[in-house]
């Protein structure tokens, strides 16, 4: 059964570790992440962007697939199914479709509108036992065509959104989605400190988790980050492994073209990377 992310994140705040949000793109991603997290005995959040949901033919398909897989694979660790960077409309659709966690990203709206819509969604999610993530301050890079400026969040705006009773809060601290440029300045930990000072025990979310040096991630976790989002890193590792298989001509040997064989190295690479990230975030054996 899918669970809200609230309890796992409260435990993470208290235990000074972070739960990973791994974004899913298809059946293989979902299966490999679930199997590895079960093995590591870690809670996990499966992130689904609007674009990924569309690719998988819709929110209901995703809910059905994840629910059935949790059951058929005998997964016992807590699993939350989370809309990633949803619009107000998408948030409502996912609540209806059976997601157990929602991110409403109102960061590109005027703060008054972000507050108004977040407030409404807090009430709906509370009533249904669904966790809600809100965002303040755009997170740079491009995700599904949504480009934000990457500014650091204003701590006072973070406080305003936090006080609405959101389960978790994403705030820009110099992090960006996708690959980091060679001249990236690093996480702005002083901004994180100022945000933490006014948001109490609310779990903070670090987006753009791919490519940030591990020591910076761990420092951010020690300062109140309790959820780290990872998408690009798994995609890169998957692609590298499948490319190697094809470059070695293995798809031409026997039935090497069978997708179950062709994608197997990529699937293993996903599992290896999940293990590596979970160990860095500190959530193994916390299920
Ligand atoms: P990356 O693709 O940079 O890992 O970011 C993932 C993310 O933040 C999803 O919201």
Image (cartoon, helix red, strand yellow):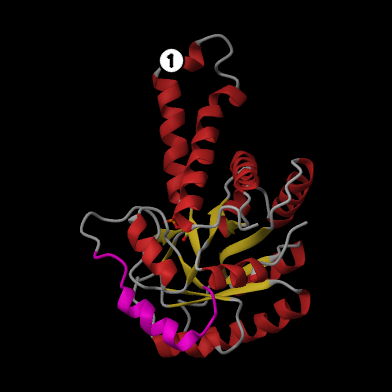
Q: Is residue 76 visible?
A: yes
Residue most extreme to the top: 254
194 left or right, relative to 86? left
- Rendered residue at 48%/62% (across/down): 228
194 left or right, relative to 8? left
Disc 1 crowd rating (10 Å Cα; few below 14, some 14-19, many 20+) is few
- Rendered residue at 39%/62% (across/down): 218
Q: Is residue 282 magenta?
A: no
* Whole-percent x, y for residue 81 in the image: 66, 59
Q: Which residue is mark 1?
A: 249
Q: Nearer the viewer, residue 161 or 149?
A: 161
Q: Which residues are magenta?
A: 185-203
Q: Nearer the viewer, residue 87 or 82?
A: 82
- Rendered residue at 54%/68% (across/down): 15
* Whole-percent x, y for residue 127 in the image: 77, 80
Measured along the vertical axis of the image, is residue 22 above or below residue 39?
Answer: below
In which image quadrant can residue 240 be found? top left
Measured along the vertical axis of the image, is residue 182 above or below residue 205?
Answer: above
117 left or right, relative to 204? right
* Whole-percent x, y for residue 50 in the image: 58, 59
Q: Nearer the viewer, residue 76 or 108?
A: 76
Which quarter of the rendered picture does the N terminus lie within? bottom right
Q: Nearer the viewer, residue 8 or 79?
A: 8
Q: Secondary structure at mark 1?
A: loop
């Amino acid at each position: 059964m899918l669970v809200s992310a609230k309890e796992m994140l409260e435990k993470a705040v208290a235990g000074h570790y972070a739960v990973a949000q791994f974004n899913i793109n298809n059946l293989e991603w979902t299966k490999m992440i679930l199997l590895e997290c079960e093995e590591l005995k870690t809670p996990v959040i499966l992130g689904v962007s609007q674009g990924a949901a569309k690719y998988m033919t819709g929110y209901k398909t995703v809910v059905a697939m994840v629910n059935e897989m949790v059951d058929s694979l005998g997964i016992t660790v807590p699993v939350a199914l989370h809309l990633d960077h949803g619009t107000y409309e998408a948030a409502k659709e996912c609540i209806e479709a059976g997601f157990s966690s929602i991110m409403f990203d109102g960061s590109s709206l005027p703060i008054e509108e972000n507050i108004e819509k977040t407030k409404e969604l807090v009430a709906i999610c509370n009533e249904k036992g669904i966790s809600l993530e809100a965002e303040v301050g755009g997170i740079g890079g491009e995700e599904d065509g949504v480009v934000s400026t990457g500014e650091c969040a204003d701590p006072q705006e973070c406080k305003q959104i936090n006080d609405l009773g959101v389960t978790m809060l994403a705030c820009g601290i110099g992090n960006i989605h996708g690959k980091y440029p060679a001249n990236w300045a690093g996480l702005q930990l002083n901004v994180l400190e100022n945000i933490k000072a006014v948001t109490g025990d609310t779990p903070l979310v670090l987006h753009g988790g791919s490519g940030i040096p591990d020591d910076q991630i761990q420092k951010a976790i020690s300062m109140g980050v309790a959820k780290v989002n990872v998408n690009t890193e798994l995609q890169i590792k998957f692609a590298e492994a499948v490319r190697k298989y094809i470059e070695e001509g293995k798809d031409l040997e026997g039935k090497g073209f069978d997708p179950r064989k062709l994608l197997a190295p990529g699937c293993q690479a996903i599992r290896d990377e999940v293990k590596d990230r979970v160990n860095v975030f500190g959530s193994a054996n916390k299920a």
